[in-house]
Image (tube, rainbow, N blue to C red):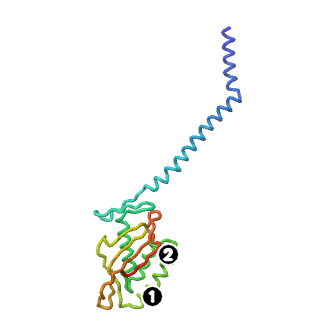
Amino acid sequence: MAESEQTKARQARVNHFLSKNSNLFTENKVLKFGFICLCLMVAYQQISIPRMIESQRTIILPSPNIQYEIGRFSANNAYIFDTSLSILAFYENVNAGNVEAFFSALLLYASPQYHGELKDLLNKRKKIIVKLKSISFFTEFVGHGDITVKGDEIYIIYNYYRRIGGKVESAVRKRLTITHVMQNGRFMITKIADKEV
């Protein structure tokens, strides 16, 4: 009697593993669970990866007193101020000897959409500067109070001088407006204009 019960129990176990329907249902449940886990992991990555990329910062220490923080679409004020002053120097502190190098350096900051327009503007100025070899231009920047940032526009107020031969003419007060955008950690000019104030 005990033998027949053991045989029946063994057959029930064997039949359970041979049953195609129950194995199919078990396999479907495992696949559904795996698919749900995969979907949850993909959703988590879609949310977290852009946040991680945006929050990354590169910190540059050009000197012990200054710290630049540059992100993918933003930068701190120290970096924006120093970059703006470099652009001012390339744009205004020119003479026949350095105009080619300075304007070429300024074009490196131009966004692709504005590159052609800025190049035309600089070429017009370059023709005049090269023609008048004895004239040079330079600027005097007073302090950080003369730089203001409003959104994507930077305003720099400065004194503009013209030297003819050995004589320096009186200063003209000017304002340079730089419209910029940060793309992939790079400062790009989208418009530049100067006017007397």
**Badge 2: how crowded within 10 Å, few (<14), some, or many (20+)?**
some
Q: Quadrant of residue 137?
A: bottom left
Q: Quadrant of residue 166?
A: bottom left
Q: Residue furthest front?
A: 197
Quadrant the C terminus occupies: bottom left
Contact? badges 1 and 2 (CB < 8 Å): no
Q: Residue furthest top?
A: 1
**Badge 1: how crowded within 10 Å, few (<14), some, or many (20+)?**
few
Image height of 72 relative to 33, above or below: below
Q: Is residue 39 left or right of residue 57?
A: right
As shown in the figure, which amino acid type bears the numbered disc 2? Answer: His
Residue 127: image tag: 1
Residue 115: image tag: 2
Q: CA distance from mark 1 to mark 2?
A: 18 Å
Q: Is residue 16 left or right of residue 134?
A: right
Q: Is residue 186 left or right of residue 144?
A: right
Image height of 181 relative to 44, above or below: below
Give the percent coordinates (x, y) of residue 24: 68, 32
Quadrant the N terminus occupies: top right
Image height of 93 relative to 134, above or below: above
The one of 18 and 171 positioned closer to us in this rendering: 171
As shown in the figure, which amino acid type bears the numbered disc 1? Answer: Lys
